[in-house]
Amino acid sequence: MNVRRRHISAVALTAVAALGFGTLTACSSDAAAGDTGKFDVVASFYPMAFLAERIGGEHVHVTSLTQPGQEPHDLEISARQTAQLEESDAALYLKGLQPSVDEAIGQSPIATKIDAAELTALEEHGTEAGHGEEHGDEHGEEHGEEHAHEDEHGHDHDHEGGDPHIWLDPVKYAEVAEGVGKAFQKADPDHAADYRKNTATLVKDLKALDGKFRTGLANRDTDVFVTTHAAFGYLAERYGLTEEAISGLDPDTEPSGARVKELQQIAEEDGVTTVFYETLVSDKTAKTLAGDTGLRTDVLDPVEGITDHSRGEDYFQVMEANLTALRTALGAR
């Protein structure tokens, strides 16, 4: 479908043809963007690719810039990926999560650029996020300086527009889906009716997921959960929880000794049973903290990519596995 194909240089076309990107649709996995006869969408990482796949259905050819098992925060765009962007009809990304993607898409002549961060309201989250001024006041006065230090020297400064992990809140993810659907309808009007229908179905499924979380977490022994990566701030706020993260928004940030000591105190005071880690980042820090505090460890997946180690084959299955893990950790009944 791509109308820009004849303007791309032979060098760029050769680079695109050589790409080994995996596609999410049933299209041939070695088909280069622009040669598919479909609406070609380049997505920055899995949550964006999942939206494009579900909304576009049979009319789209979706390629993800971030490969399964690759940590999205660490992605650096290659020259071949830049060439592919120029050959596509649309780019779907989340500004603030992957700086190299932001830069490449910003400089690309691609006609349709969809920034998920503009489709819902972003909020600021640090090492502590979620419910409660009460909990914040209880620990904040004593440990306020330590929180400020973590926020200042963690990864928060890389997310000037706020915490980008919006897909972990089904309600916010649904808002993004609606915006993506409208963008697809405008960019590819011949299939607008199908995009509209697919968007409505996806939003309905996300609302059902929200209902499962509300019901599943309604009765619990504690509101507090500990994670290695501060990815779950939106989820925590949505369901009245408090996320205590070992590091900040950057999963590779090492915690200070003061932060570890603080988490040990919080775990004891708030009845925390579990330290959560994620599939794409080492579990070493989580296991060290758990060992020091007598807690167990489990996976809480930020759904940044699906691999053979994921507890499910798509966004919905992994999120339901997250709900099960949270129910166990929080003593939900």
Image (cartoon, rainbow, N blue to C red):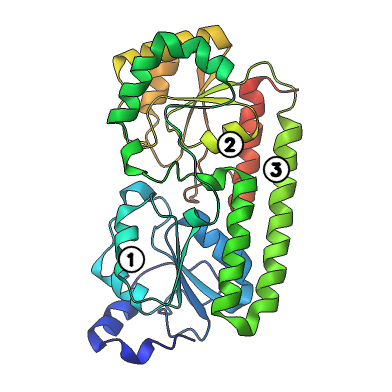
Label 3 Cα neighbours within 10 Å, binned few <14 / some 14-19 / many ≥20: some
Report which residue position mark 3 lands on.
210
Give the crowd class for mark 1: few <14, some 14-19, many >=20 residues within 10 Å.
few
Q: Residue at x 48, y 83 (%)?
A: 36
Type of the residue with mark 2: Leu
For badge 3, the amino acid type reads Asp
Q: Quadrant of residue 263?
A: top left
Are the two marked residues, 2 and 3, in contact with CB atoms closer than 8 angstroms?
Answer: no
Q: In the picture shown, does residue 155 fall above or below 245?
A: below
Q: Position of residue 156 (x, y in %)?
A: 35, 36
Q: Which residue is mark 2?
A: 235
Q: Is residue 71 visible?
A: no
Closer to the N terminus: mark 2 or mark 3?
Answer: 3
Upstream in the sequence, badge 2 or badge 1? 1
The tag on residue 80 is none
Considering the numbered disc 1 on the image, is that residue within a helix, a strand or a loop?
helix
> On screen, 261 above or below 33?
above
Residue 117 visible in image: yes
Q: Position of residue 64 (x, y in %)?
A: 43, 63
Disc number lying in front (1 or 3): 1
Marks 1 and 3, how far apart at CA: 33 Å
Badge 1 is on which residue?
106
Q: How far apart in space, not on screen, are marks 2 and 1 (Cα)?
A: 29 Å
